[in-house]
């Protein structure tokens, strides 16, 4: 075993031992996730459409994206671990709400998207080590007078249904007496269409997703991303809390991808190269926060 590979395995094992995680439900074995995959000879990856660079359908109707590429590597690791050379990989389309139920019900084995890892969600599900960090800001029309959060007073704001930004905006509106009207949408593309038509005055979301919304706008120059960052969001691939063996395997594979440098090449493809139907580059170099997280992996968030 290479020395560097041993280092990553030791780090991940330490994280697994010392993370404060509640025990699994009685009667559920730690290996249930892998056993389920072995029994069906199939691993199901949940994904969300229209969420480039993380997940979407390409021009050939194939599921692709940064998170998808990482999950496919994890599926390869599962194939090796279970000695299933003909393991099938299936994809399950989910939205902001059903992504959670698909994991909790066992309908999907892992969710491959842009789901924020926070303490509230970890009461129900588990997350791998982070694969992305972003902030929460807003997208608005360039000719509007909205430049920061105070300017949203009595405005209509588009948000993604089930997204972590919903409670943030609701809390800020209450504390600052802004009287914001939230307009939830299942997909970011719907929020973008509402902003273009004037149905909402601004859209609040993770900055990286706002960049994707901006790239798909009919007139990108007519909109701007603005507002002080509300928070730092840490994305992780989501699994069932009971599937501890599957999570350990996923963490080890992500650590291996970081150690080998492959995750940086995957990141570069999706964030620095032209992607999507318009072949637009997001031009978003990997943050120092993510680089450090990949060097010293943990599933705890930076605010804990």
Image (cartoon, rainbow, N blue to C red):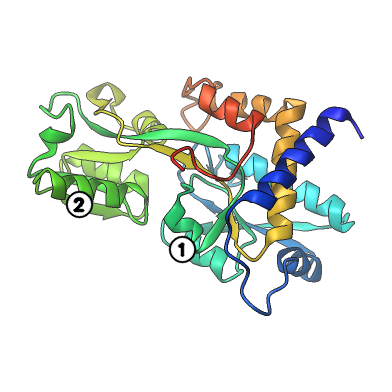
Residue at horizontal 50 percent and vertical 64 percent from the top? 124
Q: Nearer the viewer, residue 75 or 259?
A: 259
Q: Is residue 219 above or below residue 6?
A: above
Q: Position of residue 17 (x, y in %)?
A: 69, 52
Q: Position of residue 213 (x, y in %)?
A: 36, 35
Disc 2/disc 1 C-alpha distance (Å): 20 Å
Which of pointers 2 and 1 lies earlier in the amino acid sequence?
Answer: 1
Q: In the rendered view, does 227 fall on the left or right side of 272?
A: left
| Residue 134, quarter of the rendered image | top left
Local SS, label 2: strand
Q: Quadrant of residue 12?
A: top right
Percent x, y for residue 22? 57, 64
SS for callout 1: helix
- Where is residue 127? Give x, y as percent: 57, 51
Q: Could you tell me if the residues under marks 2 and 1 are in contact, i.e. CB atoms within 8 Å?
A: no
Residue 225 appears in the figure? yes
Q: Residue 182 — which label?
A: 2
Give the residue pinned by disc 1.
98
What is the total number of numbered labels drawn onto the structure image? 2
């Amino acid at each position: 075993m290479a020395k560097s590979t041993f280092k990553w395995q030791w780090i991940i094992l330490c994280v697994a031992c010392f993370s404060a995680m509640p025990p699994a439900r009685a009667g559920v074995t730690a290996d249930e996730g892998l056993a389920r995959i072995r029994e069906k000879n199939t691993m199901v990856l949940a994904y969300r459409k229209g969420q480039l660079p993380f997940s979407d359908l390409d021009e050939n109707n194939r599921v692709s994206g940064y998170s998808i590429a990482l999950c496919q590597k994890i599926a390869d690791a599962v194939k090796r671990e279970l000695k299933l050379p003909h393991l099938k990989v299936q994809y399950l389309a989910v939205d902001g709400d059903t992504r959670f139920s698909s994991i909790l019900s066992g309908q999907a084995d892992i969710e491959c998207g842009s789901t924020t890892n926070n303490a509230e969600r970890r009461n129900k599900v588990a997350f791998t080590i982070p694969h992305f960090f972003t902030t929460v800001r807003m997208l608005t029309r360039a000719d509007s007078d909205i430049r920061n959060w105070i300017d949203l007073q009595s405005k209509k704001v588009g948000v993604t249904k089930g997204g972590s930004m919903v409670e943030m905006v609701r809390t800020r509106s209450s504390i600052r007496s802004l009287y914001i009207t939230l307009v939830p949408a299942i997909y970011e593309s719907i929020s973008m269409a509402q902003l273009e038509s004037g149905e909402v005055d601004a859209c609040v979301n993770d900055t990286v997703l706002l960049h994707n919304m901006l790239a798909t706008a009919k007139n990108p120059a007519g909109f701007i991303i603005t507002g002080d960052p509300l928070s730092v969001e840490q994305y992780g691939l989501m699994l069932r809390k009971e599937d501890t063996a599957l999570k350990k395997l996923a963490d080890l594979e992500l650590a291996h991808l970081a150690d080998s440098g492959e995750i940086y090449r995957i990141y570069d493809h999706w964030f620095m190269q032209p992607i999507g139907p318009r072949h637009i580059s997001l031009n978003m170099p990997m943050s120092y926060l993510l680089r450090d997280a990949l060097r010293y992996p943990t599933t705890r968030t930076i605010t804990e």
